Image: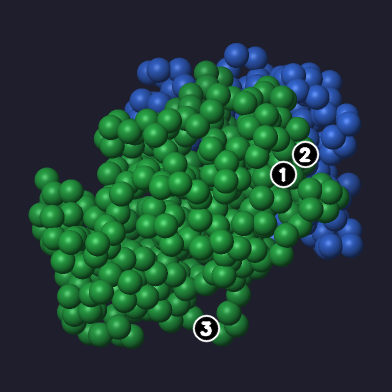
Amino acid sequence: MHDVAIIGVGIHPFGRFGPKSAIDMGAEAVRSACSDAGVAWTDVQFAFGGSNEVDNPDAVIGLLGLTGIPFMDVYNGCATAATALEMTADAIRFGKYDLGVAVGMDKHLPGAFTADPVHYSAPSWYGEIGQFLTTKFFGMKINRYMHDHGISSETLAKVAAKGFRNGALNPNAFRRKPISVEDILASKMLNYPLTQYMFCAPDEGAAAAVLCRADIASRYTSTPVYLRATALRTRRYGAYEVHSTWAAVEEDHAPTVYASRAAYEAAGIGPEDVDVIQLQDTDAGAEVIHMAENGFCADGEQEKLIADGATEIDGPLPVNTDGGLIANGEPVGASGLRQVHELVLQLRGQAGGRQVPGTPRVAYSQLYGAPGTAAVSILTT
Amino acid sequence: MPTVAFAPDVFTWPADEPQLIASRCAACGAMTFPTKPSCPRCGRTEMARHLLPRRGTLVTWTTQDFLPKEPYASGETEETFAPYGVGLIQLGDELRVEARLTESNPAKLQFGMDVELVVVPFRVEADGTEVMIHAFAPA
């Protein structure tokens, strides 16, 4: 098997862009990633494209050049972009191709996601009576977690405030205005204990990465970033997850825990080695829980860590340095590659005003979403 | 006023003491709510109808404070929307189910509190029929 390097990343800003199509944004992200890698589109041998709203992300080839390459479309909920990344990496690992592109793009309507519950193996009545809401699940999960582990509402507000503050430093972010802890706590309650400003919003955007065999990366860049591990896991019997109408009495861990363990093992890296972190912060509570589910602290330690500023850009555990989902929103197909874009910039020392200090060498990203799917990627210099 | 259950095979109705209708795997004993044709643990297809206990305890909860988009079908508008609670309820040692709560005031909801299944009006059809749903109320 070959090692895999990321030699270029590109992003179309996240936010709202009127009539501009997700395909246009995806093409711009690919063009930007190719330019960053110093490769021409004609050098790209294959691609995986992810989207929720777009049936055929491969339509970007009509804007980039109809070269006839294999271009595979994927959708895997909030883990879509990580899936595109893993499949692109695997095709190189297993020797099928030398150089390819992973891209994700989306364009959602404002407001909480909705769909037909039947597609999640839930009954249609689950939506009719008002239980088919991802936000409600996150409220239930963090409410219990706070009770069990002594996490305060103020800590959730601090997490959201950090997201907006970091977003203000990120020219590609959707939300670029700092919001105070007090204003976050005072904003409208949506799903107790989560207020409006503690949630991310579905929005629009695209992100892409160019990957190649690690042994040829030096042809393109002097600063390759190596993709050490990718792991995706679905929920197990015993996990209570998004869009569950029931759960077993005997509890099992969330899928993130299993994806995280698998990725650490494959990379030969532990949480203590990680220098910069991206976690799925669909809401501020999810970031708190995911700190523990990914091994960065024990349950309950978040209260003090966050009070001490540990997860700030200059802290020992910098989390979501680009503002995460809270500031960037979530174009589902692109979100995971937005994480990778930020981590690659951080590892190269190119993150500008939000650059973590020192020389970060190990980066970590995690996605989680309906109906109980998690993905983790580990990157190193 | 005539009443009708909002969906078949979710709870026993009409009934003085309604119960949720689950499936139980004849092979391994795992359960689902609502019913499913196959087992979520062992994958076998020997599921039998099973009535769940009416009382349980509240494992966790939240409130739904904004009007859900479609397919929500209560007939409410932004102006008439009444927030509701949602909980994960453990029924004996059998199964946990996610369900609406009749209580939506956080001050009146506690972890581990006793709750009981009730059937309550959800909306009224044009012909006056009351559509009933299940929910859990403090016991």
> Label 2 is found on which chain of the structure?
A
Identify the residue under disc 1. A158
Is residue A186 shown above or below B46?
A: below
Q: Nearer the viewer, residue B117 or A97?
A: A97
Name the residue at 74% across, 45% down: A157
What number is the disc on residue A20? 3
Report helix, strand or loop for mark 3: loop
Q: Colour of chain B?
A: blue
Q: Amino acid at mark 2?
A: Glu
Name the residue at 29% across, 74% down: A34
What number is the disc on residue B125? none
- Could you give the CA–CA distance between mark 2 and mark 3, rounded to whole angstroms? 38 Å
Location of residue B67 by image quarter: bottom right
Q: Amino acid at mark 3?
A: Lys
Label 2 or label 3, whichever comes before in sequence order: 3
Q: Is residue A279 found left or right of A345 in the rendered image? A: right
For disc 3, the neighbor class at 10 Å (few under 14, some 14 to 19, many from 20) is few
Asked if marks 1 and 2 touch (Cβ < 8 Å), the reply is yes
What number is the disc on residue A154? 2
Q: Are discs 2 and 3 located on one and the same chain?
A: yes
Q: Is residue A212 visible?
A: yes
Q: Colour of chain A?
A: green
Q: Nearer the viewer, residue A80 or A246?
A: A80
Report helix, strand or loop for mark 1: helix
> Label 1 is found on which chain of the structure?
A
Q: Is residue A244 found left or right of B132 in the rendered image? A: left
Report helix, strand or loop for mark 2: helix
> Label 3 is found on which chain of the structure?
A
